[in-house]
Amino acid sequence: MRTVVFDLDGTLADTSGDLIAAANACFVARGFGAILDPVADALIAFHGGRAMLKAGYQRIARPDAANLIEADYPVLLDYYGENIDRHTVLYPGAVAAVEALRGAGFATAICTNKPEGLARDLVARLGIADLFGALIGADTLPVRKPDPTPYIAAVQAVGGTVPRSVLIGDTETDRKTAAAAGVPSVLVTFGPEGRGIERLAPEALLDHYDDLPALIHGLLTA
């Protein structure tokens, strides 16, 4: 079984607006105002909750940033969970591309560094849960990406084999995960970094989901 494993945030869906809002809610609650910008800081959002909190507290030079981050992280998760799909949208063509792959006999899965519960809630609200045979989150296993173990688990959960699989992602974490697993990586160029992601030298770049089925056929047939 040929398998395509997708990252979630920044790959299947633009979640940056809701992620930034959750971090800003923490800053506002402490009287610092909305420190992060939902557009300019979108790339930070795709590196996770702690990365957003760290960026915000560094920006206002808080000497107690480490303690504030640990205190605020659960608050961020709670706020995000309650407001998970206010601004989030699927990238154009994502659903059609996944459906086309499944129709051509590929297995599909999600491997994300978003906590599993939040990831499952989000894909359900976006109406795409049925398009993926497995979902591995940040806390599904004792390790997370770029350790290859979650990726391997996602492939195996849908009956695939690692040598006949490929990872679709948007960050250096995804590139490192694919390299550690010994599989090709495809990085999207429609995220906040744009074609700058080419610096990571993935096996392929994806400019639009319309191009994905043909690209995957080429990678997994080679």
Image (cartoon, helix red, strand yellow):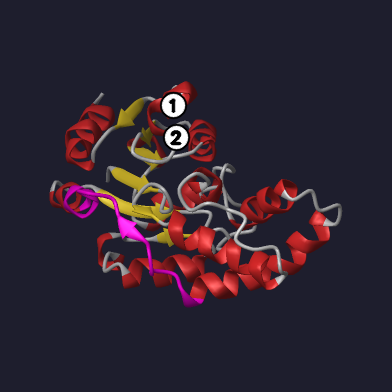
Quadrant of res 119: bottom left
Query: Which mark is drawn over residue 5?
Result: none
Q: Is residue 5 above or below residue 86?
A: above
Disc 2 marks a residue whose amino acid type is Glu
- Screen quadrant of the C terminus: top left
In the rendered image, residue 167, in percent from the top left (x then y), is placed at 39, 40
Mark 2 burial class by Cα count in 10 Å: few <14, some 14-19, many 20+: some
Q: Spatial distance from mark 1 to mark 2, Cα to Cα?
A: 5 Å
Determine whether the residue tagged by mark 1 lies in a helix, strand or loop: helix
Q: Nearer the viewer, residue 210 or 2?
A: 210
- Say which of 61 and 65 sits in front: 61
User: Would you say the residues marked 1 and 2 are in contact, meaning their CB atoms lie under 8 Å apart?
Assistant: yes
- Which residue is painted at 53% across and 35% down in the image? 172
**Disc 2: which residue:** 193
Q: Residue at x 33, y 72 (%)?
A: 125
Residue denoted by label 1: 196
Query: Magenta residues, as a range?
Result: 82-98
* Residue at x-position 39% and y-position 41%: 191
The spot of residue 78 in percent (x, y) is 58, 75
